[in-house]
């Protein structure tokens, strides 16, 4: 209904008409936009409580009217539908027609907006409110749950009073984005829980200022906002922007740099502001870079993680006076101090209790616990009555925001929060005020989200951290993390920032993407009795001068993004690993260092087992240019490399190996150790024996290994004092020569026919301990032993190669090597399936009665110089660059009988690839449906095929058989239906 004031015709200054909007009828309109369209300047649109779902943005069309929620924002909601009419114009409200302060939006909630495109920009902006060339007034509004940011201003100066801008996300400016000469004014506003999100590193979680914008914020709270991959979690100022913040609190925000405030060629002015409890990799409080000129007066910057006040670059010129900064020395400027401001801190006892199953209204005691973590971590930034910041500001005023005071008393103690069993959200929470969290055990207490800001002296224990971006340790901090499980996070497991040194004990770090543990510049975490498994991006990633210490840790099943599946060491990093197991990690097929990767680094490994790892080069350990790793008393076994160095690959490096055993590894060249590029490894008291592809291979004249008192499997004794080339007499396979495996058998089998093992790894377990009559005992330097100290066994007849009988079922062979001469006999190709690449079959060994499938480095790879037998097998569904089905390395001569090699893929040799001088023999075999040729014969290879069918294969050249300077012999063979362009 429309009401016209009686005196409207007599008094020009009287208010206009009131148009009532009610969602279910009973008013003049049911839609807000219809009422706006009908209104004239000076009218009021009164919006009744309810939810108003829209498909296109609300627009004022330049009218000087007021749109007011009658009962306030809590019950008056304007929501953009999930599928807007125009996805590129999907803000909730757009001011774009020159609106002035006379255009008023009051007492409503704006939510569900997706933002709108702007000319010249690829992203969408202003999910809640978009102002372009307009300066409206917003009062008592809630702008939440929008994408594209909460509020966007371009050439605009809106006024926002008593508004809440929360839970929004945007490319730049999750809460408020000010650009292109905008000067919005925000008074008594709360900007919280917003995030700047972009795959390219967005900035300004709370407020984003750029291109000469000059917003004014007074009496505002900016808290819990994030720009986790960018700059300025709370406020970001760049490109000549000059925001003014007065009496504002900036707390609990986080970012890559500048957790509270980041200035990048910007000149903000902050007066009586408190910046505390924020976190960043660098500059948790304030971060200045690239010539900014911030002005701080009467401010407190204290208690932030990652450094409270950080200046990057010599040209930054902050003007700081009468302020309290947490810096090593008093910051230059009149009236500055660096004394604890004495916040009131955590209320109540030092210990608080949280139980998600408890009733509402708890007080945090053990009897009446809080229901959520946010209540337990509530921290007051008010000042104690005897704070050094009271009365010491400019003109005798106080430093910091005017948040009141509390009674003088003892300094607050860091809070210890006991968290009961249950699942708790930690998104938006920071522990930068020194709080500890003690859970009921990792199987009981689960924290969902990223854990930020653990400080020196704080503890995180007895919890699982999952579903977030990792645990992030701020620069310079040294917290403790005990008895935790850290899994299923998208940004890695644990990230150690510059100069941090956390201690992790009895932790499991698994199934994270982006590294299990990432050690940034000069960080030095200590890990004891931890398991780091199944992570992508390396198990432990050591960067630029980092020096983690790992003791009694297991690093297994991790995948490097390209190099370093287990441990990645780069740019002068020097980790120390003692009594660690590094197993079944892998890198890319053409990557380096499946177990350990070293580039210009010098790790130290002592008493470590490096086994079952895989890479293109350096399956166990890769020592790249400028590296000088030290390995002492280590066992390197069962590792594989597609190209060079199954155990150790040295390229332009100088590793030192003492009392190491390198055996049972495989590579195309240098199954044990491969040296190239002028490497100068030092081996003392080492055993290098029983590796496939050559135990010790030197490539090029510039490499100069120094080998003494060692046992090397070479044609002649290697030059050097005390060296031998005699069988070291390993203890070998335990028990009878035959072992049985059945995946359906109970646990605890002994490998007998009656009690078979459940998996192949148990049947292939090979002891590198020495027999009591080994020639390596007492023959080392100073009468010590050669090889790792793995104990001895009784002198006896030499061990026999193992024959493993494998029952029907599917078995994983990834990470296993047959380099110790084992044979595998399956129950038939239709019954026994081996998943993965089969490596390392030796002369005299047999593979029969199995299907080999799913290998990503080929189906079966035959080591150079070896002549195993492969019988009654199906080799299908495998892939590789060369030899998708079977790869015959240089000088190998395997025998394949009654085999089907089909459906494999490779660039060359989809079925069978014969390298230089190889001479495989194939009888009664079918080679069909492979991509990259059925049989590919390379230089001087001479395969012999009898009674074979080669059909339906394809390649660029030679779909059936491709011969390059080779001499294959085919007898009674059928070659049909193959194709090449």
Image (cartoon, grey):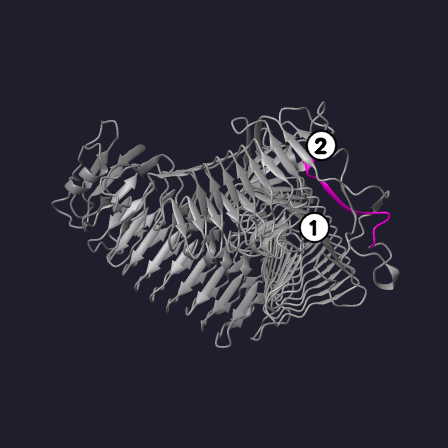
Say whether residue 614 is magenta: no
Relative horizontal placement of residue 214, taking residue 472 as reference (left or right):
left
Q: Residue at x 33, y 37 (%)?
A: 77
Q: Residues within 10 Å of mark 1 (few under 14, many from 20)?
A: many
Q: Is residue 233 visible?
A: no
- Residue 587: where, in percent of width, then height? 55, 51
Image-quadrant location for residue 304: bottom right
**Label 2 element class:** strand
**In the image, 780: left or right of 643?**
right
Q: Secondary structure at mark 1?
A: loop
Does the rendering let one see residue 703?
yes
Extreme residue toward the top, this view: 754
Q: Which residues are magenta?
A: 762-775
Which circle marks residue 738 in the picture?
Answer: 2
**Numbered mark located on residue 421 in the image:** none
Q: Quadrant of the N terminus?
A: top left
Local packing at callout 2 (Cα closer than 10 Å; few below 14, some 14-19, many 20+) is some
Front-most of 286 and 945?
Answer: 945
**Residue that extends furthest to the front in the rendered view of this protein:** 971
Residue 329 quadrant? bottom right
Residues 492 and 799: in front is 799
Kindly identify which residue carries mark 1.
690
Q: Is residue 772 magenta?
A: yes
How much space separates mark 1 and mark 2, taking CA atoms? 20 Å
Q: Is residue 563 left or right of residue 802?
A: left
First in sequence, mark 1 or 2: give its number. Answer: 1
């Amino acid at each position: 209904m429309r009401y016209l004031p009686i005196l409207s015709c007599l008094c020009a200054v009287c208010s206009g008409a009131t148009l009532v909007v009610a969602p279910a009828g009973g008013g003049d309109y049911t839609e807000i936009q219809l009422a706006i369209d009908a209104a004239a300047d000076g009218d009021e649109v009164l919006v009744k409580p309810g939810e108003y779902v829209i498909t296109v943005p609300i627009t004022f069309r330049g009218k000087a009217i007021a749109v007011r929620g009658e009962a306030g924002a809590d019950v008056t909601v304007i929501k953009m539908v999930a599928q807007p009419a125009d996805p590129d114009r999907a803000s909730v409200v757009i001011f774009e027609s020159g609106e002035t302060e006379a255009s008023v939006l009051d007492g409503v909630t704006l939510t569900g907006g997706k933002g709108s495109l702007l000319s010249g920009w690829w992203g969408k902006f202003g999910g809640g409110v978009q102002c372009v060339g307009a300066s409206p007034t917003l009062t008592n509004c809630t702008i939440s749950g929008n994408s594209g940011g909460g509020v966007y201003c371009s050439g605009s100066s809106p006024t926002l009073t008593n508004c809440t801008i929360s839970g929004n996300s945007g490319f730049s400016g999750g809460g408020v984005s000010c650009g292109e000469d905008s000067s919005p004014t925000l008074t008594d506003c709360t900007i919280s829980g917003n995030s700047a999100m972009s795959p390219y590193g967005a900035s300004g979680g709370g407020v984003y200022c750029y291109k000469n914008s000059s917003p004014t914020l007074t009496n505002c709270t900016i808290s819990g906002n994030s720009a986790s991959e960018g700059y300025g979690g709370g406020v970001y100022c760049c490109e000549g922007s000059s925001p003014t913040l007065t009496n504002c609190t900036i707390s609990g925000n986080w970012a890559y740099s500048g957790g509270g405030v980041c200035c990048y060629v910007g000149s903000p002015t902050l007066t009586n502001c408190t910046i505390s409890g924020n976190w960043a990799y660098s500059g948790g409080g304030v971060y200045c870079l690239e010539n900014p000129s911030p002005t701080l007066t009467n401010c407190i910057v204290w208690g932030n993680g990652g450094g409270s006040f950080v200046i990057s670059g010599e040209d930054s010129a902050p003007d700081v006076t009468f302020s309290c900064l947490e810096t090593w020395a008093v910051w230059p400027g009149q009236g500055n101090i660096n004394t604890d401001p004495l916040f009131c801190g955590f209320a109540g006892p030092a210990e608080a209790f949280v139980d998600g199953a408890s009733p509402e209204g708890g007080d945090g005691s053990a009897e009446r616990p809080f229901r959520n973590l946010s209540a337990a971590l509530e921290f007051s930034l008010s000042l104690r009555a005897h704070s050094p910041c009271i009365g010491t500001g400019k003109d005798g005023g106080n430093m910091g925001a005017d948040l009141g005071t509390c009674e003088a008393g003892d300094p607050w103690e860091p809070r210890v929060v006991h968290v009961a069993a249950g699942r708790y959200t930690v998104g938006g929470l920071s522990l930068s005020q020194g709080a500890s969290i003690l859970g009921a055990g990792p199987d009981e207490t689960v924290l969902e989200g990223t854990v930020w800001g653990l400080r020196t002296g704080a503890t995180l224990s007895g919890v699982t951290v999952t579903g977030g971006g990792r645990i992030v340790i701020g620069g310079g901090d040294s917290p403790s993390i005990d008895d935790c499980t850290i899994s299923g996070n998208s940004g890695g497991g644990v990230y150690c920032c510059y100069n941090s040194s956390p201690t992790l004990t009895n932790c499991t770090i698994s199934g994270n993407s982006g590294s299990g543990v990432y050690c940034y510049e000069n960080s030095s975490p200590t890990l004891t009795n931890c398991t780091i498994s199944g992570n992508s991006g390396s198990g432990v990633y050591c960067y630029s001068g980092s020096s983690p210490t790992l003791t009694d840790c297991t690093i297994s099943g991790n995948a490097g993004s390209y190099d370093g599946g287990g441990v990645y060491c780069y740019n002068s990093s020097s980790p120390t690993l003692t009594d660690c197991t590094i197993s079944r990690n892998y890198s890319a097929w053409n990557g380096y260092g499946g177990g350990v990767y070293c580039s210009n680094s010098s790790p130290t490994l002592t008493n470590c087992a490096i086994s079952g790892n895989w890479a293109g080069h350096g399956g166990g350990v890769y020592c790249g240019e400028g590296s000088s790793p030290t390995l002492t008393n280590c066992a390197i076994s069962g590792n594989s490399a597609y190209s060079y160095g199954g155990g150790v690959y040295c390229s332009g490096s100088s590793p030192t190996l003492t009392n190491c055993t390198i055996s049972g590894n495989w590579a195309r060249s240098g199954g044990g150790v491969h040296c190239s590029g002028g490497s100068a490894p030092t081996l003392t008291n080492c055993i290098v024996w029983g590796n496939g592809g050559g135990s010790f291979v030197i490539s090029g004249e510039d490499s100069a290994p120094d080998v003494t008192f060692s046992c090397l499997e070479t044609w002649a004794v290697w030059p050097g004092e005390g060296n031998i080339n005699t069988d070291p007499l390993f203890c070998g396979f335990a028990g009878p020569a035959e072992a049985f495996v059945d995946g359906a058998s109970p646990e605890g089998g002994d490998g007998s026919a009656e009690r078979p093992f459940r998996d192949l790894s148990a049947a292939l377990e090979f002891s590198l301990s020495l027999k009591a009559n080994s020639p390596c005992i007492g023959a080392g330097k100073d009468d010590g032993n050669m090889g790792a100290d793995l104990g001895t066994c009784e002198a006896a007849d030499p061990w026999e190669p193992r024959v493993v009988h494998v029952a029907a079922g599917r078995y994983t062979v990834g990470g296993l090597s047959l380099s110790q001469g084992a044979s595998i006999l399956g129950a038939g190709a239709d019954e026994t399936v081996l998943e993965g690449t089969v490596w390392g079959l030796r002369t005299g060994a047999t593979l029969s009665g199995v299907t080999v499938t799913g290998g990503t480095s080929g189906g079966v790879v035959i080591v150079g110089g070896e002549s195993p037998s492969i019988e009654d097998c199906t080799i299908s569904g495998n892939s590789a660059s060369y030899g998708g089905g079977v790869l015959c390395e240089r000088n190998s001569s395997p025998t394949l009988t009654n085999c089907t090699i089909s459906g494999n893929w490779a660039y060359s040799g989809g079925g069978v690839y014969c390298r230089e001088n190889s001479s495989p023999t194939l009888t009664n075999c079918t080679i069909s449906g492979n991509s990259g040729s059925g049989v590919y014969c390379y230089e001087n290879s001479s395969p012999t095929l009898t009674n074979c069918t080669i059909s339906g294969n394809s390649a660029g050249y030679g779909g059936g058989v491709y011969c390059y300077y080779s001499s294959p012999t085919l007898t009674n063979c059928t070659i049909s239906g193959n194709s090449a362009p």
